[in-house]
DNA sequence: TTTTCCTTTTTGGTATACAATAATATCGTC
DNA sequence: GACGATATTATTGTATACCAAAAAGGAAAA
């Protein structure tokens, strides 16, 4: 045991800044639809809700703006509404980056990375058997954390996390997740098997297919919602 | 002429917020090495330098942190120093995203997009003939703006812009640019020709090669710098 | 019903204050 | 001179107050 290894040292990790905690809280609340797309985020309301000053709220909002979760409409911070075009763009980018992550994982992940991914996949399967949104989001996060860790590209991981958070803006995707969860988990299982076999090409292909299926399902739900809207008008 | 088309309307675009202008200024200053990697960014110094309040500085710093240009070292905002691993990761991501942009451009760009890209390429060639860092950065930005516009994926464009800004942190890349600029412009010329021919596969391959060559050149200069450092120690 | 005007609310930016943390300077001891 | 301890200064994080500008809402008039 090398005493200077970060994992072994007694060094106390620095505490996250209040603004970071606020941004995390808001991100979570947005993902769980506490603030739905289009919702106005009023600074003073958030101050009361979170019990912090306007300064911390404003700084957290800047952070969320950078991620695209929040945009300013007529001078007002608003939870981002994604157009169909943007959704399509997001999935295109997800294919490119997650495809890269799949390739890198297959190429270079350690046995420990594989073991963690296997555990995360099992956890995901257990949650899908008894579907509930909260635990599903947590299990999905764990799965992708394991994938990105094994891929070993922090830049891609950071971008993909932002992508996943943006996708969570879509009610459509959680609806789509609930309805296609059994098929989805089969796809993930096949994907993980290819990664375990270090088959880069198969892993890439299965990863892309999984994302494209998710995209199609989300688009289908969006199209339905558009029809309902048209009927109302 | 349809009077409701955005381009024809008399609508005045909203002014950028002060914090946005500050972030833009800082981004530019970092790219031009006014604040080199590792430089401490002191809030009160920046207030004096830019003639704005601490709030605007802090909000701009949050934005730059989100982009990875600025990170907090021992509680102090600092211009990001990129490790060799990070540089490698950045180029991997650039291949994935710019490869996507190349494919999309070849697939769907209009003749107007192509014309703009051609103009931007000529401007770049003119600058390379009389090399100077400032005009080179501007011409390069124009070239990539044209590419991303024609690719029509704003999410990818936004991420790639952040990537390009991060890459500009590396003195290595501007040094590498100066020494390999003639070869580089040849690669770009071939790339643009493939895009003009709507040859998606060739465009993708040439794009990837260009980036990989840029990456190799940057790594070579980094390795030289490491050697010099080792000699000093 | 539509338009105009007035009031209220909200955001953007500035300034000040204080606590906590980090960095630097000073002093004493060996 | 080197080292360690302490004091001082500088910087960042957070809160609060203030005011201007912009946006939103409501009431009155046409």
Image: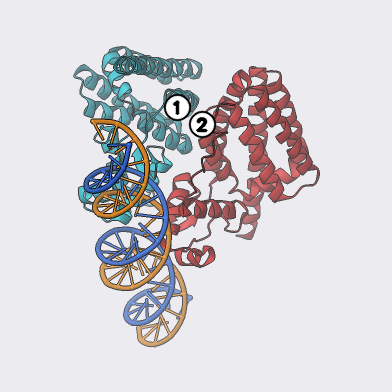
Chain colours: A red, B cyan, C blue, D orange
Q: Position of residue B110 (x, y in %)?
A: 42, 30
C24 vs B214, nearest the viewer: C24
Looking at the image, which residue is at 63% across and 53% down?
Answer: A32
Most extreme residue toward the left is B130
Q: Is residue A12 above or below residue A29?
A: above
Residue B13 visible in the shown view: no
Q: Element under label 1?
A: helix
Answer left or right for A70 relative to B54: right
Q: Is residue A88 above or below residue B131?
A: below
Answer left or right for A193 relative to B142: right
Residue contact between numbered discs 1 and 2, judged by CB atoms under 8 Å: yes
Q: Position of residue A85 (x, y in %)?
A: 53, 41
Looking at the image, which residue is at 30% across and 25% down?
Answer: B171
**Which residue does the numbered mark 1 point to in the structure image?**
B86
B179 vs A20, nearest the viewer: A20
Residues at discs 1 and 2 both on one chain:
no
Most extreme residue toward the right is A129
Q: CA distance from mark 1 to mark 2?
A: 8 Å
- Quadrant where the N terminus of chain A is found in the figure: top right
Looking at the image, which residue is at 45% across and 58% down?
Answer: A57
Determine which of the numbered discs, if any, sits on residue A30 in the image: none
Name the chain letter of the residue that bears numbered label 1: B
Q: Is residue D2 above or below residue A23?
A: above
Q: Element under label 2?
A: helix
Q: Position of residue B77 (x, y in %)?
A: 35, 43
Name the chain letter of the residue that bears numbered label 2: A
Q: Position of residue A93 (x, y in %)?
A: 53, 33
**Which residue does the numbered mark 2 point to in the structure image?**
A154
Q: Residues within 10 Å of mark 1 (few under 14, many from 20)?
A: some
Say how many tags the image has.
2
Q: Residues within 10 Å of mark 2 (few under 14, many from 20)?
A: some
């Amino acid at each position: 045991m090398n005493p200077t290894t970060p994992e072994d040292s007694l060094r106390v990790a620095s505490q996250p800044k209040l603004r970071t905690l606020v941004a995390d809280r808001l991100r979570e609340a947005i993902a769980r639809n506490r603030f739905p797309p289009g919702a106005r985020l009023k600074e003073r309301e958030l101050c009361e809700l979170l019990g912090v000053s306007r300064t911390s709220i404003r700084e957290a909002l800047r952070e969320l703006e950078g991620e695209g979760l929040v945009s300013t409409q007529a001078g007002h911070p608003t939870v981002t509404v994604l157009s169909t075009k943007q959704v399509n763009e997001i999935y295109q980018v997800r294919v490119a980056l997650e495809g890269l992550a799949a390739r890198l994982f297959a190429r270079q992940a350690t046995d420990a990375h594989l073991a963690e991914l296997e555990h995360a996949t099992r956890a995901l399967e257990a949650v899908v058997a008894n579907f509930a949104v909260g635990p599903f989001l947590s299990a999905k996060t764990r799965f992708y954390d394991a994938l990105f860790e094994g891929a070993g590209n922090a830049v891609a991981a950071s971008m993909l996390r932002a992508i996943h958070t943006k996708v969570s803006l879509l009610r459509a995707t959680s609806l789509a997740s609930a309805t296609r969860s059994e098929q989805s988990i089969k796809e993930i299982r096949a994907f993980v098997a290819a990664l375990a076999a270090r088959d880069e090409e198969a892993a890439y292909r299965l990863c892309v297919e999984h994302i494209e299926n998710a995209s199609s399902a989300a688009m289908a739900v969006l199209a339905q919602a558009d029809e309902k809207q048209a009927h109302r008008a």
